[in-house]
Amino acid sequence: MSVPSSRKKLWLYLGSATFVALSVLVIATFLSVKDIKLERDGAEYAVQVLDRHGTPLTVSYKGAWNSHDNRSLHEFPDFMRQAFLQSEDKRFYSHGGVDWQARGSAVWQNIRYGHTVRGASTITEQVVRMLHPRPRNIWSKYIEGFEAASLEQQYSKNEIFEFYLNQIPYGSNRRGVVQAARYYFGRDLSTLTQREMLSLAVLARAPSAYDLYRHPDKTKKAIDRLAAQVSEGDELQPILAQDVVAVPPAGVVEARHFARYVKTQPGINATQLHTTLDSSIQTMVQETLDQRIQSLASKKVMNGAALVIDHTTGEILAWVVAGAGNNDIDAHDIDAVTVPRQPGSSMKPFLYARALDKGWHAGMFLDDSPLSEAVGNGLHRFRNYSRQYYGPVSVREALGNSLNIPALLTIRYVGIADYLTTLHQLGFESLDRGSDIYDEGLALGNGEVTLLELAGAYTTLAEHGVRKPLRVLLNDQRPVTARRVYSDEAVSVIGNILSDPWARRQEFGQGSVLNLPLQTAVKTGTSTDYRDAWVIGYNDRYVVGIWMGNLDHKAMDGVTGSTGPTLAMRNIFAQLNKGRETRKLYLSPQLVRKDVCIRPGPDCTMRPEWMKPDDILEVVAENTPVLEMVRPTEGLQMAYDPRVPADYQKFRFEIKGLKPDEQVKWVLNDEVLTESGGGTYLWPVQRGAYMLKASISGDSGTVRDMAPIQFLVK
């Protein structure tokens, strides 16, 4: 019997429609299924910077991925892994990406209750959902099954599970159980109790529904149910007896500038950098500096920076930038620790230390009297900050009171080029001009330096005159080159002066804010027109340096180093010294105490002074400049410019400190150039390596040969 044609047509129509539908389904599936890889699209694989205790300094929870806090699967506690498998995917290690048994059970329960009770997504499917987010519907579920199967063909179960534990989303944009442990309990995985581990598995189901902060009771009941599934009998009761208390996370440590500096260090290729920074000290210094700047807002102080260094190890413990923006300047984007500013008198200890090494002692007298110097066709009158002059003062009083006139006399004795070379040995790379440019103003801090350079140089004073590079990495295996810049005796005397209230009494008063309970060497600095206020101090262990001012270079309203940052420094030292055994500043055993006269004259009061055994007591520093080669300096490198005519390329050789009757014989590479007075000679620049010699002769017939200078013209 034949089938009626109408029925044949119906079957043909249904078959065709089915074929078309299946074809469309296959095509749609093919177009929807994506190539699946355990790779985080757009993830920032940045270097993670940690403090000395492992606290992240570069934490950001704005991204879509956990790029830093990743662990290998074996680093997750076994109990935690079992809790997640029991909670999320019991047959993870037996299915091929989709658990059909669990999916069927979920469908039946959802139909039975009339709404979605469970989703039955496997761990693999959840990973797919992280990698390829889609709207939550049946079609997405269908596609995710294909991609889950593909993922399991490419990666092992352990690789998928490890990715899941590191990237599973939690509340407040945390991802992975490491970040979740810190967010909910403020601790690392290795310190969690079993009940806390169970809570992380429960919270992963639905971070908004289960939340230890907002829904603690509901969450704890779910934890109890999971505990009963994971453990039983004698193992269960101790877990149920444990408490789960959420600990609000501490604020993120603000150390972006330090982290950026660390990443620029040469020879670093690790993905995790354990630094010397101490988060607790960093936070304390940040709060202290913020409060002080806020209190000085009426004085037009907007910005500041601070460093804390353990000078016994060279480790930077705090690197703080504080303040608000200035007009178009975003203060948070500028690292005030590394911005060159004028240091003022905070540089004077380095000058006096050099003078002590060249023959002076702290009991010598300098004439603090009005001083004028020729500048161009006019005169510049130098003065002290208080506009007072004290006549003959000792080196101790000159440095302690930060007097300007004696500092100018000191640089004449030391020599400008000599002093600049010393500053370079201390690490002041910002002072990159010639000594003839800075001239005697270098004694008063006219060259710009950074807080990082200044604080680093003070560690040399604190560490017996030996310069060591500052350290930012714990267990840094890179070779460290130490260099002696000053003698042990010189820096001991400098530290003794800077910690002596008597030495600073005339300008700062007997009860100065610079007098700290524990012996602390302190020096302030204020630049021209109150644009910069500095204070640097060091005790037996720490160096604390602070700068205040405005990043747009606007002047403050009369704020000095002693009236601005010093109060913040006092508070920082008080916190640093809590709970530790403190000592006085180091004093070289080579020093002896000798009675010296406070003021020159027949009737004077005697006072004990620290000095070397062979120092001569009755010495008054002469007010005459030292003979020195100002240009060129040792090791100078110049560039010959072929675009400029040779006749226009001349370099001035210059010697300072000549007497009016003295002549100079200039000898370049053993060839006599000329013999003339005045101390200068214009030399036609030519490429090559040179050695310059100069012989000084006067009416007396004596000849003095200066040390030869080597320089290079490229």
Image (cartoon, grey):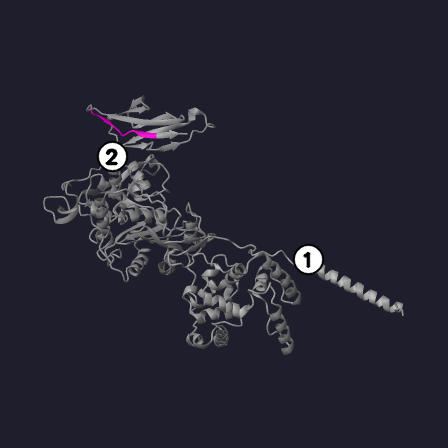
Res 123 → quadrant: bottom right
* Tag 1 residue: 31
Q: Amino acid at mark 2?
A: Val
Q: Residues within 10 Å of mark 1 (few under 14, many from 20)?
A: few
Of 102 and 360, which appears nearest the observer? 102
66 falls in the magenta region: no
252 horizontally vs 19: left or right: left
Circle 1: residue type = Leu
Q: Is residue 475 above or below residue 631?
A: below
Q: Quadrant of the N terminus?
A: bottom right
Q: Which disc is residue 626 wearing?
A: 2
The foreground one among 304 and 686 is 686
Residue 140 vs residue 36, the one in the foreground: 36
Residue at (61% x, 70% y) in the render: 101
Region of the chain picked out in magenta, as a range? 702-710
Residue drawn at 25 percent across, 41 percent down? 354
Q: Nearer the viewer, mark 1 or mark 2?
A: 1
